[in-house]
Amino acid sequence: MSSLAMILAGGEGPALSVLTAQRSEAAMPFAGKYRVIDFALSNCVNSGIFNVAVLTQYQPRSLNEHIGLGRPWDLDRTTGGVRLLQPYQSTKGQTGAWQEGTADAVRFNLDLARSVDNVLILPGDHIYKMDYNPLLRLHRDRDADVTVATKSVPAFEAHRFGMIGTDQTGGVIEYAEKPKRTYNTTASMGIYVFKAQVLADWLNGPGLKDTNLGRDSLPGLVRTGKVYAYQFHGYWEDAGTIQAYYEANMALLAETPALNMYDPDWVIHTRSEERAAAYLGETARVQGNLLCDGCQIEGTVVRSIISPGVRIAAGAEVRDSIILTDTQICAGAVVDRAILDKRVVVEEGAIVGDGDDLTPNRKFASRLNTGLTVIGKGAVVPAGVKLGRNVLVSHHVKARAYHGKDVASGETVG
Amino acid sequence: MRVVGLILAGGAGTRLGVLSEHRAKPAVPFAGRFRIIDFTLSNCVNSGITNVGVLTQYLPRSLNEHIGIGRPWDLDRSHGGVRLMQPYQGKGHQQWYGGTADAVLQNIDYLRETRADTVVVLSGDHIYKMDYRKMIQTHEEHHADLTLAVMNVGAEETSRFGIVLTEEDGRVSGFLEKPKEAPSTLANMGVYVFNTGALIERMLALASEHEDLDFGKHVIPSMVETHRIYTYPFDGYWVDVGTVDAYWSTSMELVSGKSRLDLYDDSWVIHTRSEERAAAKVGPQGQIQQSMVCNGCIVRGHVFRSILSPGVYVSPGAVVRESVIMNDTWIGPGAVVDRCIVDKNVVVGGGTLLGHGADYDTPNDKAPDKFYTGPTIVGKRAHIPQGVTIGRNVVIEPDVNDEDFDRFDCVVPSGMTVS
């Protein structure tokens, strides 16, 4: 049985604010040196699936560069391997537009699936380790048209998921997208195995107008075809909001985290630059952190995630924060409960995350309200300036944008 | 101009003791995640030399695996790239490499096939960053047959090196291999740029006289009178970590933050083959100062002035001081590791004191000439039981088990060997 994995990596991830201003959600850095899509890609190769298509649309440059020919995953192959697929124009008139959703994206690329038996649809923005073989086996054993990977969720979270009702044999008899009320606690993970023929027939037939596989296609398929549920019990996280992203990263600092990144039998592969070992100087104080190769630390770092190439000067202090690649924190600066994107410079004596005024962000109150301060790629925090909580600094903001003033909680710079 | 690089990587590195028992010296790990040969290989590709032969002989497996097809250095190429060259059999000729130049001589066909006009001959066991392009440029400007990279060494060290006498314009007027008394402190670094023609002609002429044909002993001295040899002065960082003491002190200099070797320089990246590992994790009880820690380490104890290679685990309450710990070694709770070099996959039992006491001067019983400066050395995959006290200059051989410590009754005095 041959399988093709389609990884859906075109999503914008709007709830991640400035962090996804210049990259798609699937390209979000995670655990210091990874990108979120590394999980889906590594799960594929660790499950023996070497025929992988990555469907991109929103800000694909970062992903293109990261995945390249697929070397880190041994996906630079003569047969199969990884393909990066962008929306394209066509003369037939029926395609040739931007993709409106998951079903639309898959429909555009159905020609890839012609010579395979099954298509495995995977979201590119989930953090989990999963062997797809038991899922594929169940799909085959039941001779299913569609098999949906599921996970139990508490009832109060049901409104965020596609909820599934099953019969005794695991057959799906009911599907409701983000229901307000439901008795079911089985949620779809957005991971599907389709018989390739069923997928093509549906999307070009009854589902021709479908834009979203879960919302639009699944209810119809449940009525007309054989749909089964596959229960997954491991760690699974959709880090699609700033708070969820922060928590998923910070959870790795636990003594025994739910997500084990040190498992030699299920390695998460990534493209990494060549860097020397992390260096800790004479004045370094580190406690409860993740430190990546290439970082140089002279200051104090507590409960934080430090990506490759980050420099933290003597006298600087970083607490409960995520610091992405090549960011620099100068002497006397303090960073507290913040997410700093790549190549940010926090100059001497600046404070990021000051005081205990937790006013939500005025522009994005629904997204930034838990006290985290977020600084976009390449931005500068000038010397001596204080940033409060829930502050948002756009990418590439220069020192003059601050007009030499402190930034109160809830404000946005740039 | 066509340039080919030849890296001599066949040396046994006997003075590194158990560290080179299972691998050639160029394959000895350095600075946590590198191997010594990474410096020379990276210098080649950073200098635009993408046609590189690596000549191996002694325990090449570790090197073969490390270099593979040369991916990390972008040397997996259709034209040129890296080639690993072992001694081989042929009609009318079958022998091991007898000396440095003999190794090159036995691969003379390769040199001819590459049609290179310039050969850069390098040693695979030195740590330095050098742009060979500049050296090749001076070689051309001088219309030299051979250019030697040279540096000034201390007067007490001259007997370890080939010593070079020069005229004012840098032309070599004399060459003394490891002299007892040196008239100069200008030392040959073992970095040579040869005209291919001159090299081949000289090697063939000398081959019948010397089975152990060596650049320093035979080839260069024979060229001083008849050929144009020039020097290329180098004043950057360069070390030969050929002894345990040099290896340990070079490592300590690196963690002090005062080393002249900048490993974080974006413009001259040292490439290496590395396994994929997650970020290093420091537990809430952990403390790390003046140290280098690689991806995949988990540190729950205290680490001072040490280098931890990928995958090292330091248990809560353990202390690692002034030590070099290689890949995937496990250090048990409450263990103290002081001034040690610990090879890969070692297990240090809980509460064990490895490198204990002030007796730095009792040399090792089996190799007093190699291990006499203090560091205790632990070979690959050794298992050290719990609660043992182990002194200085102790050598624990690879693969020893708990039972091998029975005869010591929990105390291994300084200078002993556990086998």
Image (spheres, rainbow, N blue to C red):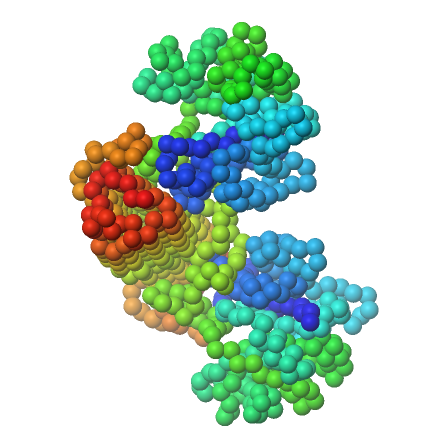
Q: Is residue B412 above or below residue A250?
A: above
Which residue is nearer to you in this view: A137 or A403? A137
How far across and how far down the image is residue B412, in percent?
22, 45
Q: Is residue A137 above or below residue B319?
A: below
How far across and how far down the image is residue B64, in percent?
54, 42
Left or right of B343 on screen, residue B61: right
How far across and how far down the image is residue B310, in percent?
41, 51
In the image, farthest residue toward the right: A92
Left or right of A397 on screen, residue B256: left
Left or right of A109 on screen, residue A243: left
- Residue A390 visible from this viewpoint: no
Which residue is nearer to you in this view: A38 or A344? A38
Which residue is nearer to you in this view: B216 or A46? B216
Number of residue marks:
0
Residue pictured at 69% horizontal, 71% vertical: A1
How far across and how far down the image is residue B192, in percent?
53, 22
Looking at the rendering, which quadrant does residue A132 occupy? Answer: bottom right
- Residue B391 visible from this viewpoint: yes
Looking at the rendering, which quadrant does residue B93 occupy? Answer: top right
Residue pictured at 49% horizontal, 62% vertical: A265
Residue pictured at 54% horizontal, 22% vertical: B101
Q: Is residue A227 above or below residue B277?
A: below
Residue pictured at 51% horizontal, 21% vertical: B212
